[in-house]
Each structure stands twice: as structure tokens, then as C-alpha cells.
Amino acid sequence: MVPQWVIEKKRDGGRLDDVEIRAFIEGFTAGSIPEYQMSALAMAVFFRGMDTGETAALTEAMRCSGDTLDWAGCPFPTADKHSTGGIGDNLSLMLAPLAATQGVAVPMISGRGLGITGGTLDKLDSIPGYDTRLGTDRFREIVTSVGCSIIGQTARLAPADKKLYALRDVTGTVPSIPLITASIMSKKLAEGAASLVFDVKFGHAAFMKTKAEAERLAESLVRTGKTAGRRCVALLTGMDRPLGRAAGNAVEVAEAVETLRGEGPADKRRLTLALTEEMVALSYPGRPRHEIASALAKALDDGSALRKFREMVEAHGGNARFLDDPTHLPQAGTVLEIPAPAGGFVQDVDADAIGRIVLQLGGGRKAVTDAIDYAVGIDRLVQQGESVEKGQPLMRLLANDAATAEALVRQAAAAVTIGAEKPETVPLVAGRFE
Ligand code: URA
């Protein structure tokens, strides 16, 4: 294989075969194909696209660049969920133990926050003692004995993706459906779960800005997953407004605990139930949907999902005291309420603005190497459609010093729009692909 011939073929709109794609990715991973040639191919793919077969071959080549997990000895069917990321999106924390209550084993390998969107891994790292860096053997033991485990991505899982993502980030080649698909799917397939549910978000705080783009990504993920022999479903969900009432790390863990108690914001509960239902239905195809739905609601209301979460936290070495008393999570030194400038109905809560505020409070990273402050964030955030009185708090800023919080007051007030009429709310789930 001559790398420049492969680049030229794609540049001219040709179709790459499996052998060319595999050889290119192997060469790039091993270092014999330099970054400039990989970048050129990524740009050619960006402009020319890839068909389903090419995307599947690229995914497979990237999956095989590192370790792959096999769950053949696990007594339960395995399933996982991937979200394309949003503000207040802590659903993995509830969904993994909830699915485990129904005999689904959840081996979940999560990432850190990307841009303004939070990452499950950062949220788990805010739990005192919780070890997100367990080796594969312990991960396997916990998934098999508890039913769910969430850890961080290891350097040995799809290393070609790690290398290629870093290049795409600096060569303008991130927003390409085949490249995004191969990136997400190579990691998910290496993790080995038999069923995969995708939460593809769209809106101004999401990676995909429009519903049409999200549909294309959802279709591509599902098609590629099925080509690789996995059972897959994708839900399209809106990300113009944050999910729930909290954004940050420790605050989102606290809100997950409320939801696992059968309390918490209604939108989080509904979306957690919807996604977990898909995981259970894919894992047990004969089980009636209505029966799955009521078993899941019961598991949230009767404390079984919370017990599973406690087992998972303890298996990871975490101190589970925060489950009974949230003050055992990192606490911010300064709490500042943002008063409503007028009374009326909440028309909109700008998820993008909320994400930016959390980042400036120190709850996200400006550079990959930045340390996160787990205690800071936003809580008690109003939601679209609620009525507020003038002066009533719209949210609380949780900061580690008063000056940082004060500097964000205007931005925080501007993130919420208030008007006289009660707004129409959009459905939480806007589409489904299987
Ligand atoms: N998330 C990923 O893992 N990869 C992409 O390319 C985009 C989002």
C-alpha cells in the first residue's frame, strides 16, 4: 500500500477497500505513516465522505489498534450507552445501576469533559475514594459481580483513535460523520458490550447543532454498530437547555443520587428511564416494553437502583457516605443566588451559557491539562415553563471565591429568559433510530 495513492483515491471521490483502510490505520498507529499523510486522508474523508462499508472498515481498523474486551464469561447480557455530550448530562450515573437491577451487565468506559460539556469521569472523580483507573481484571470482576462499573478510558483502548482525534482537533477535520462514527464506535466496540444505545444530542450546546445533523450521525452509528454485529438503538434528544437543575461535577453526583431515590428533576428521570428501557429491551428482546418500563420506575422508587449504585461506588473504593449526606461531596466555599430581574414564566435557559459559566467557575477545563474544581458549579437552576416571582433565585452559583462568582452574575442572569406567556415545551426525545 502506497499511502499517497490511498489519499489521492479518496481525494478524487473513490471508494477505499478494507485492505487499504486497515493498512493505513496500522501504519499510522505504528508510526510508519506520518501525521501529515493521516491529516491529508482525514481532510479527503471530510470532503468526500465514506459509505457504510468504508466507515465500518475504518471503525474495525481503529478498534483493532489496541486491546478489546470480551464478555463471553459474563452471566448477564452486556449493554452500554453513549451520549454525544451535553450540559447537566449525568445520566450514566443513574442508568448503569438502573440497568443492572434488571439483569443487564453494564461495562461502561467513559471520557472526560470536552469543551463546555461535562464528562462522566470527572463527575465520578468528585466522589471521595472512587477509583476510575482500575485495570481490566478488576473492571471485569465488578461488572460480573455488581452488574455495572464505570471507569476511564485506558491508553490501550483504540489508541489509533486517540492519535487521530488529536490530529483532527488541529486540522479542522472533527465534524465529519464517518470520522466521528469511527471514533466513537471503535472505543465502544473495543469495550465489547453486545448492545449499544446512543443518546445523540442536538442544539446549540451540543456537538451536532441541528436535528438533521444529529439524524445523520444517529443513523451512521446504528448502521456501523449493526455491521459489527451489535444490537443498536439511537435516541435523538434536544440540548438547547440543560438537563435537570445542576451543572458541575459534585452537584451532578448529588442530583444523580436524588434521581436514584425516585426524586430529582422530572426531565432527568424520564430520559434515564427511556434510555435504560432501550438497553433492557435490546438485552431481553422477548420482554414486553410496558413490563420493562414499570420495573425500571419501581427500581428507582423502591431504592434498588440506589443500592446498586452504592455497591458500585464501594467496589471502586469510594466512600458511600455521600449517599446519605451530600455534604460528604466536595463543597464550594461561596454560594451566590442570582435573583430574577422580573416575574413571569421561564421561556428559555441557555445551556451553552450555563456550560460556559461552569467552565469559568473552574468546573471544566480550558486546556486538557487543567485541573478541575469538583465543588463548583450551578444548582437549583430554574427550568423552562416554570413561573418565577421578581427577586426569586434563578440559580445558585457555587464558587470557591466570592470574586469569581461576582464576576459571573450578569452572565448568569442573562442565561435565563423570562416572559409573560407560558412557553410551549418541546418533547425530550425527538426521534429514534434502530
Ligand atoms: N466524541 C468522540 O469520541 N469522537 C469524536 O470524533 C467526536 C466525539
Image: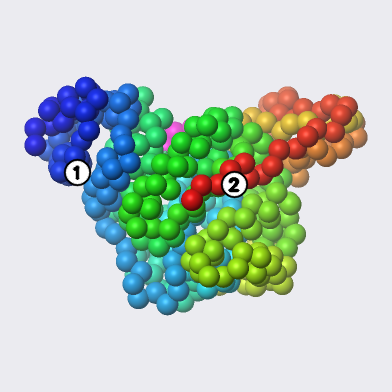
- Label 1 neighbour load within 10 Å: few <14, some 14-19, many 20+: some
Please tell me which residue is depicted at 24% across the width and 47% down the height of the picture: 61
**Number of marks in picture:** 2
Q: Amino acid at mark 2?
A: Asp
Position of 390 relative to 85 (above/below): above
Residue 124: x percent and y percent?
Answer: 53, 56
Q: Position of residue 64 (x, y in %)?
A: 24, 52
Which secondary structure is most common in the magenta stretch? loop
Q: Residue at x 64, y 52 (%)?
A: 271
The image quarter containing residue 168 is: top left
Residue 89: mark in rendering: 2
For marks 1 and 2 on the same chain, the one whose residue lies earlier in the sequence: 1
Report crowding for label 2: few under 14, some 14 to 19, many 20 or more residues within 10 A (C-alpha).
many
In the depicted view, which residue is nearer to us: 234 or 392? 234
Quadrant position of the N terminus in the picture:
top left
Residue 418: horizontal and vertical position, in percent? Answer: 81, 28
**Element under label 1?**
helix
Residue named by callout 1? 18
Report how far apart the C-alphas of labels 1 and 2 lie in the structure.
Answer: 36 Å
